[in-house]
């Protein structure tokens, strides 16, 4: 039986609860950053970051790419997962081993054993970029959690409820932090406030966020 320590200290390395089955693992990715950055470089060389258009006709301020069997895409016709990159017609780059290992360890640490993601969406934020409140519900397997890794500049993450109008908590996500959520928290609304420019010593004026899902 898992117990939740509601008074956990961010410095202590304990998961910080954000909900019944949502946790923030501060600094969890730090030991792997030196392997993650070149892996992101290889993925974005094969499948460059690009600004996609939403079904409503808006160009996203966040640039994205994907790796893994399935990649999340959007265009005027809707949101969906695709096996190929619409820009090249080629399969998305394979998920680097360091990605899947980290995702599995983080999911495990948050109480979701045996997580096997088949999709990884990589988002790049430059100063001013934002993500409006949304639910992640295009995945076929909503029983699997989502694992979300933040690198580079800090961001204010909004973590709301099951209605768009529910009051959202504000959490600051820093370089190396991982959020994991599933179960009753899986469909909560969330978003990111416009990014302030606070250059990061390694990544400069950008934030990279990647989210692992079981989409197929
Ligand atoms: C971001 N993240 O942190 C945007 N979605 O830049 C997400 O939209 C997200 O962090 C589902 C699960 C975790 C996330
Ligand atoms: Fe999301």
Image: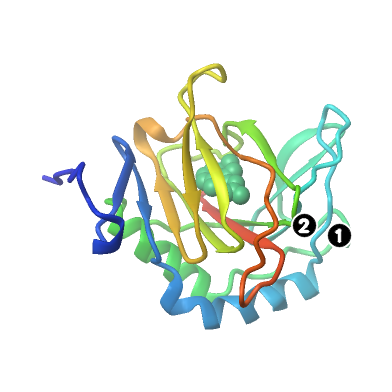
Characterize the local packing of mark 2: few (<14), some (14-19) or many (20 or more) Cα atoms within 10 angstroms.
Answer: some
**What secondary structure is marked by label 1?**
loop
- The residue drawn where x is 67% and y is 67% is 199
* Residue at far left of view: 1
Q: Which residue is mark 1?
A: 89
**What secondary structure is marked by label 2?**
loop
The relative height of residue 185 versus residue 108 in the rendered view (above or below) is above
Residue in the foreground of this view, choosing between 6 and 182: 6
Is residue 19 found left or right of 7 in the rendered image?
Answer: right
Q: Give x and y (percent) for residue 186.
A: 44, 35
Specify whether tag 2 is near ligand 2 (CB below 8 Å): no
- The residue drawn where x is 71% and y is 78% is 42
Label drawn at residue 84: 2
Q: Is residue 27 visible?
A: yes
- The residue drawn where x is 54% and y is 43% is 157
Number of numbered tags placed on the structure image: 2
Q: Give x and y (percent) for residue 86.
A: 85, 53
The relative height of residue 184 versus residue 26 in the rendered view (above or below) is above
Assess whether mark 1 and mark 2 are in contact (beta carbons under 8 angstroms). yes
Label drawn at residue 140: none
Is residue 160 found left or right of 20 in the rendered image?
Answer: right
User: What distance separates the C-alpha of mark 2 from that of mark 1?
Assistant: 6 Å
Q: Is residue 215 visible?
A: no
Query: Is tag 2's residue or tag 1's residue first in the polypeptide sequence?
Result: 2
- The residue drawn where x is 79% and y is 61% is 49
């Amino acid at each position: 039986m898992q117990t939740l320590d509601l008074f956990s200290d961010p410095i202590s390395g304990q998961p910080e609860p954000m909900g019944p089955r949502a946790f923030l693992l501060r600094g969890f990715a730090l030991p792997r950053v030196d392997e993650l950055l070149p892996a992101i470089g290889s993925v974005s060389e094969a499948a460059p970051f690009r600004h996609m258009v939403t079904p409503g006709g808006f160009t996203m301020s966040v640039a994205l790419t994907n790796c893994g069997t399935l990649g999340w895409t959007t265009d005027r016709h809707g949101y969906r997962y695709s096996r190929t990159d619409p820009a090249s017609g080629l399969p998305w780059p394979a998920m680097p081993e360091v990605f899947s290992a980290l995702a599995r360890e983080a999911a495990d640490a948050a109480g979701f054993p045996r997580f096997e993601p088949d999709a990884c969406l990589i988002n790049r934020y430059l100063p001013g970029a934002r993500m409006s409140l949304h639910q992640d519900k295009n995945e076929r397997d909503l029983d699997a959690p989502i694992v979300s890794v933040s690198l580079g500049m800090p961001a204010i993450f909004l973590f709301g409820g099951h209605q768009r109008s529910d009051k959202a908590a504000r959490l600051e996500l820093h370089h190396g932090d991982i959020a994991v959520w599933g179960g009753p928290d899986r469909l909560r609304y969330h978003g990111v406030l416009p990014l302030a420019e606070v250059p990061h010593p390694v990544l400069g004026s950008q934030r990279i966020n990647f989210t692992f899902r079981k989409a197929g």
